[in-house]
Image: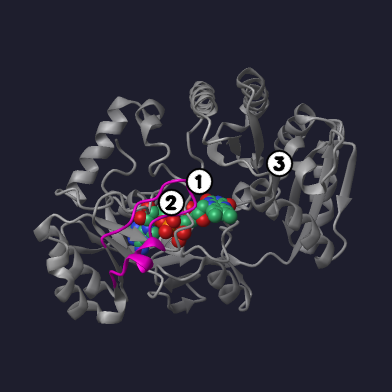
Amino acid sequence: MLNSLTGEFKKILGTENVLQDPADLICYSYDSSPYESIPGTVLFVKNTEQIQKIIYLCLNEKIPVYSRGAGTGTTGASVPLKNGVSVVFTKMNSIHGFNQENLMIDVEPGVITGDIHNFVESKGFFYPPDPSSLKFCTIGGNVMTNAGGPRGVKYGVTRDYVVSLEVITGKGEIIRTSAKTAKNASGYNLTQLFVGSEGTLGLVSGITLKVIPKPRMTLTLMSEFPGINQAMQGILNIFKNGVLPCCIEYLDANCVNLIRNRKESAETLIISEVDGFEESINTQLSLVEKSFKDAGCNNIIIAKNNEERDEIWRVRRGLSPAIKKLGYSGKISEDICVPRHNLPAITDKISEISLKFDIKIICFGHAGDGNLHVNFLFDKNDADEVSKTHRAIEELIENTIMLGGAISGEHGIGLSKRDFLKMAVGEVNYNIMKEIKKIFDPEGILNPGKVFI
Ligand SMILES: Cc1cc2nc3c(=O)[nH]c(=O)nc-3n(C[C@H](O)[C@H](O)[C@H](O)COP(=O)(O)OP(=O)(O)OC[C@H]3O[C@@H](n4cnc5c(N)ncnc54)[C@H](O)[C@@H]3O)c2cc1C
Protein backbone atom coordinates (compact mmCIF):
# COMPACT_ATOMS: atom_id res chain seq x y z
CA MET A 1 0.00 0.00 0.00
CA LEU A 2 2.79 2.37 1.04
CA ASN A 3 4.83 1.68 -2.12
CA SER A 4 1.90 2.67 -4.32
CA LEU A 5 2.22 6.22 -2.87
CA THR A 6 5.90 6.65 -3.76
CA GLY A 7 5.12 8.49 -7.00
CA GLU A 8 2.78 10.88 -5.16
CA PHE A 9 5.35 11.53 -2.41
CA LYS A 10 8.00 12.31 -5.03
CA LYS A 11 5.64 14.71 -6.81
CA ILE A 12 4.98 16.59 -3.56
CA LEU A 13 8.51 16.62 -2.14
CA GLY A 14 10.90 16.01 -5.07
CA THR A 15 12.69 12.69 -5.63
CA GLU A 16 15.65 13.65 -3.45
CA ASN A 17 13.38 14.04 -0.42
CA VAL A 18 11.94 10.52 -0.53
CA LEU A 19 14.20 7.73 0.78
CA GLN A 20 13.47 4.04 0.26
CA ASP A 21 16.88 2.42 -0.05
CA PRO A 22 17.26 0.02 2.94
CA ALA A 23 20.73 1.44 3.69
CA ASP A 24 19.21 4.94 4.02
CA LEU A 25 16.21 3.75 6.02
CA ILE A 26 18.41 2.22 8.74
CA CYS A 27 19.61 5.72 9.66
CA TYR A 28 16.04 6.64 10.65
CA SER A 29 15.24 3.42 12.52
CA TYR A 30 16.46 4.43 15.98
CA ASP A 31 16.80 7.28 18.41
CA SER A 32 18.84 7.51 21.61
CA SER A 33 16.86 4.70 23.29
CA PRO A 34 17.40 0.95 22.84
CA TYR A 35 14.40 0.72 20.42
CA GLU A 36 14.83 0.15 16.68
CA SER A 37 12.42 -0.38 13.79
CA ILE A 38 12.94 0.40 10.11
CA PRO A 39 10.50 2.86 8.48
CA GLY A 40 8.79 2.01 5.18
CA THR A 41 9.72 5.37 3.65
CA VAL A 42 11.50 8.50 4.87
CA LEU A 43 10.12 11.87 3.77
CA PHE A 44 11.90 15.20 4.21
CA VAL A 45 9.40 18.05 4.39
CA LYS A 46 10.04 21.73 3.81
CA ASN A 47 6.69 23.48 4.25
CA THR A 48 3.19 23.27 5.70
CA GLU A 49 1.45 22.56 2.37
CA GLN A 50 3.64 19.53 1.74
CA ILE A 51 2.88 18.17 5.20
CA GLN A 52 -0.85 18.63 4.69
CA LYS A 53 -0.73 16.77 1.37
CA ILE A 54 1.19 13.90 2.98
CA ILE A 55 -1.31 13.67 5.81
CA TYR A 56 -4.21 13.50 3.32
CA LEU A 57 -2.50 10.70 1.38
CA CYS A 58 -1.69 8.72 4.54
CA LEU A 59 -5.16 9.29 5.96
CA ASN A 60 -6.72 7.82 2.83
CA GLU A 61 -4.62 4.67 3.05
CA LYS A 62 -4.45 4.55 6.92
CA ILE A 63 -0.65 4.67 6.81
CA PRO A 64 1.11 5.50 10.13
CA VAL A 65 2.98 8.84 10.24
CA TYR A 66 6.02 9.14 12.54
CA SER A 67 7.43 12.66 12.97
CA ARG A 68 11.13 12.96 13.54
CA GLY A 69 13.44 15.82 14.47
CA ALA A 70 17.08 14.88 15.08
CA GLY A 71 16.25 11.51 16.66
CA THR A 72 17.99 12.30 19.96
CA GLY A 73 14.96 11.35 22.07
CA THR A 74 15.62 8.81 24.80
CA THR A 75 12.26 6.99 24.88
CA GLY A 76 11.79 5.64 21.34
CA ALA A 77 9.14 8.32 20.64
CA SER A 78 10.27 8.90 17.04
CA VAL A 79 10.98 5.23 16.24
CA PRO A 80 8.63 4.03 13.44
CA LEU A 81 6.98 0.95 14.95
CA LYS A 82 4.86 -0.16 12.02
CA ASN A 83 5.49 0.02 8.30
CA GLY A 84 4.77 3.72 7.95
CA VAL A 85 6.39 6.97 6.87
CA SER A 86 8.98 8.85 8.91
CA VAL A 87 8.43 12.57 8.32
CA VAL A 88 11.76 14.25 9.01
CA PHE A 89 11.87 17.98 9.80
CA THR A 90 15.60 18.68 9.62
CA LYS A 91 15.35 20.48 6.26
CA MET A 92 12.62 22.79 7.59
CA ASN A 93 15.13 24.85 9.51
CA SER A 94 14.75 28.60 8.98
CA ILE A 95 14.56 31.29 11.61
CA HIS A 96 11.87 33.58 10.19
CA GLY A 97 11.52 36.62 12.33
CA PHE A 98 12.70 38.06 15.60
CA ASN A 99 10.59 40.85 17.01
CA GLN A 100 12.51 42.56 19.79
CA GLU A 101 9.56 44.70 20.95
CA ASN A 102 7.37 41.62 21.33
CA LEU A 103 10.26 39.50 22.66
CA MET A 104 9.22 36.72 20.27
CA ILE A 105 10.92 34.70 17.58
CA ASP A 106 9.32 32.61 14.79
CA VAL A 107 11.19 29.45 13.87
CA GLU A 108 10.62 26.34 11.80
CA PRO A 109 10.58 23.02 13.70
CA GLY A 110 13.85 21.67 12.29
CA VAL A 111 16.03 24.50 13.62
CA ILE A 112 18.76 23.20 15.93
CA THR A 113 18.10 24.49 19.45
CA GLY A 114 21.67 25.75 19.89
CA ASP A 115 21.27 27.88 16.73
CA ILE A 116 18.34 29.67 18.37
CA HIS A 117 20.52 30.31 21.43
CA ASN A 118 23.33 31.73 19.29
CA PHE A 119 20.95 33.83 17.18
CA VAL A 120 19.16 35.55 20.06
CA GLU A 121 22.26 35.87 22.26
CA SER A 122 24.11 37.67 19.47
CA LYS A 123 21.40 40.33 19.82
CA GLY A 124 21.53 40.51 23.62
CA PHE A 125 18.55 38.23 24.29
CA PHE A 126 18.12 34.82 25.86
CA TYR A 127 16.20 31.61 25.11
CA PRO A 128 16.74 29.68 28.37
CA PRO A 129 15.73 26.01 27.75
CA ASP A 130 19.05 24.17 27.39
CA PRO A 131 18.80 20.41 26.92
CA SER A 132 22.31 18.96 27.04
CA SER A 133 21.69 17.78 23.45
CA LEU A 134 21.18 21.39 22.28
CA LYS A 135 23.96 21.26 19.68
CA PHE A 136 22.09 18.62 17.68
CA CYS A 137 18.43 18.33 18.77
CA THR A 138 15.67 20.30 17.02
CA ILE A 139 13.29 22.82 18.52
CA GLY A 140 10.35 20.79 17.13
CA GLY A 141 11.57 17.76 19.10
CA ASN A 142 11.98 19.99 22.18
CA VAL A 143 8.41 21.27 21.87
CA MET A 144 7.01 17.78 21.34
CA THR A 145 8.87 16.34 24.37
CA ASN A 146 8.66 19.50 26.50
CA ALA A 147 12.43 19.33 26.86
CA GLY A 148 14.14 20.75 29.92
CA GLY A 149 17.75 21.26 30.92
CA PRO A 150 19.94 22.55 33.73
CA ARG A 151 18.49 26.08 33.61
CA GLY A 152 14.95 24.80 34.28
CA VAL A 153 15.21 25.46 37.99
CA LYS A 154 15.04 29.23 37.53
CA TYR A 155 13.77 29.68 33.98
CA GLY A 156 11.43 26.71 33.42
CA VAL A 157 11.28 24.33 30.47
CA THR A 158 10.34 24.51 26.77
CA ARG A 159 6.63 24.72 27.65
CA ASP A 160 7.20 28.06 29.38
CA TYR A 161 8.52 29.66 26.17
CA VAL A 162 6.04 28.40 23.55
CA VAL A 163 3.65 31.21 22.64
CA SER A 164 1.92 29.71 19.61
CA LEU A 165 2.21 26.77 17.20
CA GLU A 166 1.18 26.00 13.66
CA VAL A 167 0.03 22.39 13.56
CA ILE A 168 -1.32 19.99 10.94
CA THR A 169 -3.67 17.57 12.71
CA GLY A 170 -4.28 13.92 11.89
CA LYS A 171 -7.33 15.09 9.91
CA GLY A 172 -5.17 17.34 7.74
CA GLU A 173 -6.46 20.59 9.28
CA ILE A 174 -3.93 23.42 9.61
CA ILE A 175 -4.38 25.28 12.90
CA ARG A 176 -2.70 28.20 14.70
CA THR A 177 -3.04 27.38 18.38
CA SER A 178 -2.98 30.96 19.71
CA ALA A 179 -2.54 34.61 18.83
CA LYS A 180 1.09 35.68 19.14
CA THR A 181 0.44 37.84 22.17
CA ALA A 182 2.04 38.10 25.60
CA LYS A 183 -1.30 37.22 27.19
CA ASN A 184 -4.29 35.27 25.92
CA ALA A 185 -7.38 34.23 27.86
CA SER A 186 -9.53 33.11 24.94
CA GLY A 187 -10.82 29.60 25.49
CA TYR A 188 -8.83 26.45 26.10
CA ASN A 189 -5.05 26.57 25.84
CA LEU A 190 -4.43 24.48 22.72
CA THR A 191 -0.78 25.51 22.56
CA GLN A 192 0.00 23.81 25.85
CA LEU A 193 -2.02 20.76 24.84
CA PHE A 194 0.33 20.18 21.92
CA VAL A 195 3.52 20.79 23.93
CA GLY A 196 4.78 17.39 25.10
CA SER A 197 2.34 15.46 22.88
CA GLU A 198 5.19 13.52 21.20
CA GLY A 199 3.84 13.67 17.65
CA THR A 200 0.56 11.94 18.61
CA LEU A 201 -1.81 14.89 18.03
CA GLY A 202 -0.32 16.74 15.08
CA LEU A 203 2.78 17.70 13.12
CA VAL A 204 4.27 21.04 14.13
CA SER A 205 5.23 23.24 11.20
CA GLY A 206 5.75 26.63 12.88
CA ILE A 207 6.78 27.71 16.37
CA THR A 208 6.62 31.12 18.05
CA LEU A 209 8.89 31.31 21.09
CA LYS A 210 9.21 33.85 23.86
CA VAL A 211 12.69 35.18 24.64
CA ILE A 212 13.88 37.27 27.58
CA PRO A 213 16.73 39.74 28.14
CA LYS A 214 20.10 38.04 28.52
CA PRO A 215 21.39 37.95 32.12
CA ARG A 216 24.34 40.30 32.49
CA MET A 217 26.50 37.99 34.56
CA THR A 218 26.74 34.30 35.48
CA LEU A 219 28.81 32.64 38.20
CA THR A 220 29.43 28.88 38.31
CA LEU A 221 30.18 26.85 41.43
CA MET A 222 31.21 23.24 41.94
CA SER A 223 30.52 22.08 45.49
CA GLU A 224 31.75 18.86 47.07
CA PHE A 225 29.72 17.08 49.74
CA PRO A 226 30.69 14.11 51.92
CA GLY A 227 27.52 12.22 50.90
CA ILE A 228 24.13 12.32 49.22
CA ASN A 229 22.15 13.36 52.29
CA GLN A 230 24.26 16.46 52.87
CA ALA A 231 24.01 17.38 49.18
CA MET A 232 20.21 17.03 49.18
CA GLN A 233 19.96 19.09 52.37
CA GLY A 234 22.14 21.76 50.75
CA ILE A 235 19.72 21.97 47.83
CA LEU A 236 16.70 22.28 50.11
CA ASN A 237 18.46 24.99 52.18
CA ILE A 238 18.87 27.07 49.01
CA PHE A 239 15.13 27.39 48.52
CA LYS A 240 14.49 28.11 52.21
CA ASN A 241 17.13 30.85 52.09
CA GLY A 242 15.23 32.68 49.34
CA VAL A 243 17.70 32.48 46.47
CA LEU A 244 16.97 30.98 43.05
CA PRO A 245 20.08 29.78 41.19
CA CYS A 246 19.65 29.14 37.46
CA CYS A 247 21.16 25.62 37.73
CA ILE A 248 21.46 23.04 40.49
CA GLU A 249 22.88 19.83 39.02
CA TYR A 250 23.56 16.71 41.09
CA LEU A 251 26.22 14.03 40.43
CA ASP A 252 26.31 10.94 42.67
CA ALA A 253 29.50 9.26 43.87
CA ASN A 254 29.49 6.83 40.91
CA CYS A 255 29.47 9.80 38.52
CA VAL A 256 32.30 11.49 40.35
CA ASN A 257 34.36 8.29 40.29
CA LEU A 258 33.73 7.95 36.58
CA ILE A 259 34.70 11.42 35.60
CA ARG A 260 37.71 11.84 37.80
CA ASN A 261 38.74 8.28 37.17
CA ARG A 262 39.42 7.81 40.89
CA LYS A 263 39.20 4.47 42.64
CA GLU A 264 38.61 5.78 46.17
CA SER A 265 35.10 6.63 47.30
CA ALA A 266 34.35 10.14 46.12
CA GLU A 267 32.08 12.88 47.30
CA THR A 268 28.78 13.92 45.82
CA LEU A 269 28.97 16.98 43.61
CA ILE A 270 26.56 19.83 43.03
CA ILE A 271 27.15 22.17 40.10
CA SER A 272 25.21 25.38 40.46
CA GLU A 273 25.03 28.78 38.80
CA VAL A 274 23.69 32.13 39.83
CA ASP A 275 22.98 34.84 37.26
CA GLY A 276 21.48 38.29 36.89
CA PHE A 277 22.61 41.87 37.25
CA GLU A 278 26.18 42.25 38.51
CA GLU A 279 24.96 44.01 41.66
CA SER A 280 22.97 40.96 42.75
CA ILE A 281 25.55 38.27 42.10
CA ASN A 282 27.52 38.45 45.36
CA THR A 283 24.37 38.36 47.48
CA GLN A 284 23.13 35.31 45.59
CA LEU A 285 26.55 33.68 45.86
CA SER A 286 26.79 34.12 49.63
CA LEU A 287 23.29 32.69 50.13
CA VAL A 288 24.19 29.60 48.09
CA GLU A 289 27.49 29.21 49.96
CA LYS A 290 25.69 29.49 53.29
CA SER A 291 23.06 26.95 52.22
CA PHE A 292 25.71 24.43 51.24
CA LYS A 293 28.04 25.01 54.22
CA ASP A 294 25.16 24.68 56.71
CA ALA A 295 24.48 21.26 55.16
CA GLY A 296 28.09 20.11 55.64
CA CYS A 297 29.64 20.94 52.26
CA ASN A 298 33.40 20.18 52.20
CA ASN A 299 34.61 22.49 49.50
CA ILE A 300 33.28 25.05 47.01
CA ILE A 301 35.15 25.89 43.81
CA ILE A 302 34.04 29.08 42.07
CA ALA A 303 34.93 29.47 38.38
CA LYS A 304 37.04 32.61 37.94
CA ASN A 305 36.68 32.85 34.18
CA ASN A 306 35.02 31.23 31.15
CA GLU A 307 37.71 28.54 30.87
CA GLU A 308 37.14 27.43 34.45
CA ARG A 309 33.37 27.55 33.90
CA ASP A 310 33.69 25.37 30.79
CA GLU A 311 35.88 22.95 32.73
CA ILE A 312 33.18 22.53 35.39
CA TRP A 313 30.50 21.91 32.73
CA ARG A 314 32.82 19.52 30.90
CA VAL A 315 32.56 17.28 33.97
CA ARG A 316 28.75 17.26 33.71
CA ARG A 317 28.60 16.90 29.91
CA GLY A 318 31.17 14.09 29.94
CA LEU A 319 28.85 11.85 31.93
CA SER A 320 26.91 10.10 29.15
CA PRO A 321 30.04 9.18 27.13
CA ALA A 322 31.82 8.13 30.34
CA ILE A 323 28.93 5.79 31.23
CA LYS A 324 29.15 4.23 27.74
CA LYS A 325 32.87 3.54 28.30
CA LEU A 326 32.02 1.35 31.30
CA GLY A 327 31.11 -1.30 28.72
CA TYR A 328 27.71 -2.47 29.98
CA SER A 329 25.67 -3.83 27.06
CA GLY A 330 22.38 -2.65 28.59
CA LYS A 331 21.46 0.80 29.88
CA ILE A 332 18.00 2.07 30.76
CA SER A 333 17.71 5.70 31.83
CA GLU A 334 14.76 6.73 33.94
CA ASP A 335 13.86 10.42 34.16
CA ILE A 336 11.84 10.69 37.36
CA CYS A 337 10.77 13.95 38.99
CA VAL A 338 9.71 14.28 42.64
CA PRO A 339 8.59 17.27 44.66
CA ARG A 340 11.87 18.78 45.84
CA HIS A 341 11.22 18.09 49.53
CA ASN A 342 11.22 14.37 48.67
CA LEU A 343 14.70 14.39 47.14
CA PRO A 344 16.30 12.84 50.27
CA ALA A 345 13.63 10.09 50.32
CA ILE A 346 14.02 9.19 46.63
CA THR A 347 17.83 9.23 46.67
CA ASP A 348 17.78 6.92 49.73
CA LYS A 349 15.37 4.64 47.86
CA ILE A 350 17.64 4.57 44.78
CA SER A 351 20.61 3.42 46.93
CA GLU A 352 18.36 0.81 48.55
CA ILE A 353 17.17 -0.50 45.16
CA SER A 354 20.75 -0.74 43.89
CA LEU A 355 21.72 -2.87 46.91
CA LYS A 356 18.54 -4.96 46.94
CA PHE A 357 18.78 -5.98 43.27
CA ASP A 358 22.58 -5.84 43.12
CA ILE A 359 22.47 -3.55 40.09
CA LYS A 360 24.81 -0.72 39.14
CA ILE A 361 22.86 2.55 39.17
CA ILE A 362 24.39 5.87 38.19
CA CYS A 363 22.30 8.87 39.12
CA PHE A 364 22.64 12.50 38.11
CA GLY A 365 20.43 15.31 36.94
CA HIS A 366 18.53 18.49 37.54
CA ALA A 367 18.10 18.04 41.28
CA GLY A 368 17.03 21.66 41.73
CA ASP A 369 13.84 20.65 39.90
CA GLY A 370 13.59 17.30 41.72
CA ASN A 371 14.36 15.72 38.31
CA LEU A 372 16.87 12.83 38.39
CA HIS A 373 18.26 10.70 35.58
CA VAL A 374 18.57 7.23 37.08
CA ASN A 375 20.70 5.00 34.82
CA PHE A 376 20.41 1.24 35.28
CA LEU A 377 23.43 -0.61 33.84
CA PHE A 378 23.28 -4.33 33.09
CA ASP A 379 24.25 -7.15 30.76
CA LYS A 380 21.45 -7.34 28.22
CA ASN A 381 22.43 -10.88 27.21
CA ASP A 382 21.91 -12.20 30.73
CA ALA A 383 18.21 -13.01 31.20
CA ASP A 384 18.45 -12.84 35.02
CA GLU A 385 20.05 -9.40 34.94
CA VAL A 386 17.44 -8.14 32.49
CA SER A 387 14.61 -9.44 34.65
CA LYS A 388 15.96 -7.99 37.92
CA THR A 389 16.63 -4.66 36.19
CA HIS A 390 12.99 -4.48 35.14
CA ARG A 391 11.87 -5.30 38.69
CA ALA A 392 14.21 -2.62 40.04
CA ILE A 393 12.79 -0.07 37.58
CA GLU A 394 9.23 -0.95 38.59
CA GLU A 395 10.18 -0.42 42.21
CA LEU A 396 11.67 2.97 41.38
CA ILE A 397 8.56 4.01 39.45
CA GLU A 398 6.22 2.86 42.24
CA ASN A 399 8.22 4.78 44.84
CA THR A 400 8.33 7.88 42.65
CA ILE A 401 4.54 7.84 42.35
CA MET A 402 4.14 7.17 46.09
CA LEU A 403 6.29 10.24 46.80
CA GLY A 404 3.99 12.41 44.67
CA GLY A 405 6.32 12.37 41.67
CA ALA A 406 6.11 12.08 37.87
CA ILE A 407 7.57 9.23 35.79
CA SER A 408 9.10 11.71 33.34
CA GLY A 409 10.41 15.18 34.09
CA GLU A 410 11.57 16.05 30.58
CA HIS A 411 12.15 13.08 28.24
CA GLY A 412 8.51 12.07 27.75
CA ILE A 413 6.80 8.68 27.60
CA GLY A 414 7.38 7.32 24.06
CA LEU A 415 7.73 3.56 24.12
CA SER A 416 9.90 3.11 27.18
CA LYS A 417 7.44 4.42 29.78
CA ARG A 418 4.06 3.76 28.17
CA ASP A 419 3.44 0.71 30.40
CA PHE A 420 3.59 2.97 33.46
CA LEU A 421 1.54 5.94 32.25
CA LYS A 422 -1.85 4.73 33.48
CA MET A 423 -0.42 4.00 36.93
CA ALA A 424 1.23 7.44 36.99
CA VAL A 425 -1.69 9.63 35.93
CA GLY A 426 -4.65 7.46 37.02
CA GLU A 427 -7.26 5.72 34.88
CA VAL A 428 -9.58 8.72 34.49
CA ASN A 429 -6.82 11.06 33.27
CA TYR A 430 -5.43 8.33 31.02
CA ASN A 431 -8.81 7.85 29.34
CA ILE A 432 -9.30 11.62 28.95
CA MET A 433 -5.92 11.81 27.19
CA LYS A 434 -6.94 9.02 24.81
CA GLU A 435 -10.22 10.79 24.04
CA ILE A 436 -8.31 14.02 23.29
CA LYS A 437 -6.12 12.13 20.82
CA LYS A 438 -9.24 10.94 18.98
CA ILE A 439 -10.33 14.56 18.40
CA PHE A 440 -7.13 15.46 16.57
CA ASP A 441 -6.33 12.05 15.11
CA PRO A 442 -9.57 10.05 14.74
CA GLU A 443 -7.98 7.38 12.50
CA GLY A 444 -5.01 6.91 14.84
CA ILE A 445 -2.38 7.47 12.13
CA LEU A 446 -0.12 9.78 14.17
CA ASN A 447 2.72 8.01 15.98
CA PRO A 448 0.62 4.92 16.81
CA GLY A 449 1.86 2.75 19.68
CA LYS A 450 3.52 5.65 21.52
CA VAL A 451 2.54 7.14 24.88
CA PHE A 452 -0.48 4.79 25.24
CA ILE A 453 -0.40 0.98 25.20
C1 LIG B 1 23.32 13.30 25.00
C2 LIG B 1 21.87 13.66 25.19
C3 LIG B 1 21.53 14.61 26.14
C4 LIG B 1 20.19 14.95 26.35
N1 LIG B 1 19.88 15.92 27.27
C5 LIG B 1 18.60 16.27 27.46
C6 LIG B 1 18.27 17.27 28.43
O1 LIG B 1 19.12 17.82 29.11
N2 LIG B 1 16.97 17.58 28.56
C7 LIG B 1 15.99 16.99 27.82
O2 LIG B 1 14.81 17.33 27.98
N3 LIG B 1 16.28 16.05 26.90
C8 LIG B 1 17.55 15.67 26.72
N4 LIG B 1 17.85 14.70 25.78
C9 LIG B 1 16.76 14.06 25.02
C10 LIG B 1 16.44 14.71 23.63
O3 LIG B 1 17.55 15.43 23.13
C11 LIG B 1 15.21 15.59 23.74
O4 LIG B 1 14.07 14.80 24.02
C12 LIG B 1 14.91 16.42 22.46
O5 LIG B 1 13.83 17.29 22.73
C13 LIG B 1 14.57 15.57 21.23
O6 LIG B 1 14.67 16.39 20.08
P1 LIG B 1 14.85 15.74 18.64
O7 LIG B 1 14.89 16.81 17.64
O8 LIG B 1 15.99 14.80 18.65
O9 LIG B 1 13.47 14.95 18.53
P2 LIG B 1 13.19 13.41 18.14
O10 LIG B 1 13.91 12.50 19.08
O11 LIG B 1 13.41 13.23 16.70
O12 LIG B 1 11.63 13.33 18.44
C14 LIG B 1 11.13 13.46 19.74
C15 LIG B 1 9.60 13.47 19.70
O13 LIG B 1 9.15 14.66 19.04
C16 LIG B 1 8.32 14.32 17.92
N5 LIG B 1 8.58 15.35 16.91
C17 LIG B 1 9.78 15.83 16.50
N6 LIG B 1 9.58 16.84 15.62
C18 LIG B 1 8.24 16.99 15.48
C19 LIG B 1 7.40 17.88 14.72
N7 LIG B 1 7.89 18.85 13.96
N8 LIG B 1 6.05 17.72 14.80
C20 LIG B 1 5.52 16.75 15.59
N9 LIG B 1 6.26 15.92 16.34
C21 LIG B 1 7.60 16.04 16.28
C22 LIG B 1 8.72 12.90 17.55
O14 LIG B 1 7.65 12.22 16.91
C23 LIG B 1 8.99 12.32 18.92
O15 LIG B 1 7.78 11.96 19.53
C24 LIG B 1 19.18 14.33 25.57
C25 LIG B 1 19.52 13.36 24.60
C26 LIG B 1 20.84 13.03 24.41
C27 LIG B 1 21.17 12.00 23.37
Residue at (67%, 24%) from the top-left corner? 351
Compare residues 272 and 316 and report the one nearer the observer: 316
Distance from Cα at disc 1 to Cα at disc 3: 16 Å
Whether the residues at callouts 1 and 2 have beta carbons within 8 Å, the answer is yes
- On whether ligand 1 comes within 8 Å of the CB at mark 2, the answer is yes
Compare residues 71 and 183 and report the one nearer the observer: 71
- On whether ligand 1 comes within 8 Å of the CB at mark 1, the answer is yes
Residue 110, how many percent across, how many down? 42, 69
**Amino acid carrying mark 3 in the image:** Tyr
Whether the residues at callouts 3 and 2 have beta carbons within 8 Å, the answer is no
Residue 200 vs 336, above or below: the answer is below
Compare residues 263 and 67 and report the one nearer the observer: 263
Whether 68 is among the magenta residues is: no
Residue at (80%, 59%) from the top-left corner? 311
Residue at (41%, 67%) from the top-left corner? 208
Whether 36 is among the magenta residues is: yes
Report the residue that reaches farthest toward the left. Answer: 60
Residue at numbered disc 3: 250
Magenta span of residues: 19-40
**Amino acid carrying mark 2 in the image:** Thr
Q: Secondary structure at mark 3?
A: strand
Residue 227, how many percent across, how many down? 80, 30
Residue at numbered disc 1: 410
Say which label, 1 or 2, has the lower sequence index.
2
Residue at numbered disc 2: 145
Distance from Cα at disc 1 to Cα at disc 2: 7 Å
**Amino acid carrying mark 1 in the image:** Glu
